[in-house]
Image: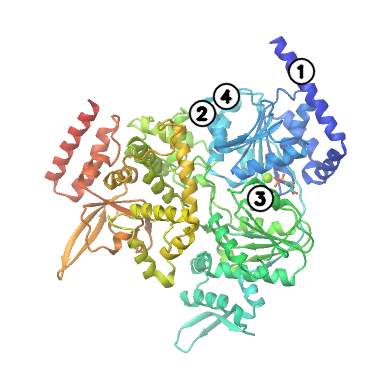
Amino acid sequence: TAIMEKILWRRSLQLHAQQQAWQESLEGRGILEFRQSLPAYKEKDAILTAILQNQVLIISGETGCGKTTQIPQFILESEIDFVRGAVCNIICTQPRRISAMSVSERVASERGEKLGESVGYKVRLEGMRGKETRLLFCTTGILLRRLLIDRNLKGVTHIIVDEIHERGINEDFLLIVLKDLLPRRPELKLILMSASLDAELFSSYFGGAPLIHIPGFTHPVRIHFLENILEMMGYRLTPYNQIDDYGQERMWKMSKQAPRKRKSQIASAVEDALRAADFKDFSPQTWESLSCWNPDCIGFNLIEYLLSYICENERPGAVLVFVTGWDDISSLKDKLQSHPILGDPNRVSLLTCHGFLASSEQKLIFEEPKDGVRKIVLTTNIAETSITINDVVFVLDCGKAKETSYDALNNTPCLLPSWISKVSAQQRRGRAGRVEPGECYHLYPRCVYDAFAEYQLPEILRTPLQSLCLQIKSLKLESISEFLSRALQSPELLAVQNAVEYLKIIGALDESENLTILGRYLTMLPMEPKLGKMLILGAILNCLDPVLTVVAGLSVRDPFLTPLDKKDLAETAKLQFSRDYSDHLALVRAYEGWKEAEKDLAGYDYCWKNFLSAQSMKAIDSLRVEFLSLLKGTGLIDGNATSCNTWSYDQHLIRAIICYGLYPGICSVVPHVQHNEKSFSLKTMEDGPVLLYSNSVNARESRIPYPWLVFNEKIKVNSIFLRDSTAVSDSVLLLFGGSISRGNVDGHLKMLGGYLEFFMQPAIAEKFQSLRREFDELIQN
Ligand code: ADP
Ligand code: MG
């Protein structure tokens, strides 16, 4: 060890000399000057002293003040200055993979190094770090995974948890684990960083840990709501509190001041939305139409109008456009590229910023455009707080957001876009005032903004807890509910119980809440357990190709489009993929057709003809690859396999695998004949009668020759609607509904028996149960 210490000492001295040389070089001095201009730099000494004196420190400061790029760097530099460079080990977590990657690159270049030397990054399936890496940026999921194998984080000296104001479920989870770890590792330092001022919550969670606030500065930003935008177009949206000719009370009125043909499409769409609400209601629901982001929707048209307005009439300055997700970004980009001004590379540099960005494109968004060219960046909510583009003067805000990260451990990837909070809207607005007074266009009326929630609820309080519960179990922690009761804000006991109950039903936990073998495999697959189950069985039964498509399809936005004006055509188009009473199998056929067409570069035409979303198809294509490599990571399939498909074309088997994943999402099909016409009704055990979503292939059938449907999702509107469904037979339900693992046979039988008894004669149910018991005995022997 004495030799070891000597080596480390020598290495530390080397690092110190290197760092000094860089800081004294011409280039290094230039960068230092920029860094010193950031507000965070002024707090450098205070921050380093506070870290020295406390185990936990909380830092808040406005977005762009230099938290993410500077503070980890201050710590690294100071460690190197104190000749501890070779022994320090700093980990900084980011909620999204793209920020881990872009920030590490930035920090490495500020240190005059290549990525992978003293600064590196690690995200799922990708990384860049070397033996000498002392500061590692990684996603929160990566650190949680490391905790699985290394409970005490041996050798780590500093942990920085960034963007805690977002209150993602992973970050909340990590904080509970770290809070437990701190007393075991008294020399470990924990630094939490937040973009908002509500840092007291975190301070009191960590026993009154000190707070440092970095004061920032932004220029004033002028705010425009939809009313003001319409006015720019020559329309006036006014409160109009009178009885109209038909005796109806109208609260709002659109009037034309100077109608111009080109823009009337937008105004009339707004008017339609108003009409749909009887001219009374300005609730967010009424404005849903603003966010049906297909190329002809009102939201895209508004954006196009405003962008060309800004390009023609406004002072120089970059434009940041917030839309909901990367699929919107790419369709919006397609649309704008055919515009005479916005598509002209001599006038506009049209860039995108989202989780799947290649790093070459990433750099462009920070660069200054050529003279006379306006930079326009289409972004997801990533640019709200985690990525700062300096020269933004104009912001367009669609008012919605969708989680786009597939990296999260607890992942519900097919989240629908939802309205943002007031705090988010203010953050978006603030992006416009960094260099000079800016303008922000909110693409919704003022009263919709007024109806936004103040803050968004923390994710742990609003999402299903199934995957989280599995993670807790895999960390070999105590009882799930006890563990979660120590969270920053604990989820309701009922939500926890529901999740645990669900995990027992699907066979991931046994009766005494221990992970089953299935459960252990599921923790290796960062996705909803039901999707993980399908992948696992698909791999075991050698039927992976279609199952990968089904699972990827359930993880993206519905690829079957139903434009409101062509609903019938679209639904008919979907029917041609349907032969066997399954939306999931219809998707498999649609995808395979697209894949064929892509070979002749005709994928886009194929989508257009068949009312499919090309973006969703591409997303499915890349997710399939990702899921396959995740499965390889579990060891269930051979690392070299490109697919395993012996039984891929057996639709009964695919049906069984879908049933295995979606159980207990099941409903019974009750056929009846009325006036000589065949039809059927549907029932679930929990809700009684339910209906099918109109674009389900099963909704077009007059009879379904199977007694059951398994479904992915229920939506409650006025009645309860099922989205995608697949018909299955008694025997499939019996054999594949739930788990066939040894641990919970009894619980499972009780559950399945409950279903059967509810819908059938008890005698038949009993017969099924004894069959099932025989089957289980067979398996176990
Ligand atoms: P915070 O985490 O407080 O929001 P950051 O540390 O991310 O702030 O960014 C600080 C500043 O560094 C930004 O205002 C921006 O000017 C600059 N910056 C960050 N990343 C890059 C990059 N990749 N390229 C150029 N400048 C960057
Ligand atoms: Mg940051």
Badge 4 is on which residue?
152
Q: Secondary structure at mark 3?
A: helix
The span from disc 3 to disc 2 (Cα, nearest Å) is 34 Å
The span from disc 2 to disc 4 (Cα, nearest Å) is 10 Å
Badge 3 is on which residue?
361
Label 4 packing within 10 angstroms: few (<14), some (14-19), many (20+): some
Q: Secondary structure at mark 1?
A: helix
**Residue 482, visible in the rendered structure:** no
Residue 148 marker: 2
Q: Earlier in the sequence, mark 3 or mark 1?
A: 1
Residue 696 versus residue 542 in the image, above or below: below
The span from disc 4 to disc 3 (Cα, nearest Å) is 38 Å
The span from disc 4 to disc 1 (Cα, nearest Å) is 25 Å
Q: Amino acid at mark 1?
A: Trp
Residue displayed at 47% across by 89% down: 245
Residue displayed at 38% across by 62% down: 717
Q: Secondary structure at mark 2?
A: helix
Comparing 574 with 67, the one in front is 574
Residue 69 in the image: x percent, y percent?
Answer: 72, 41
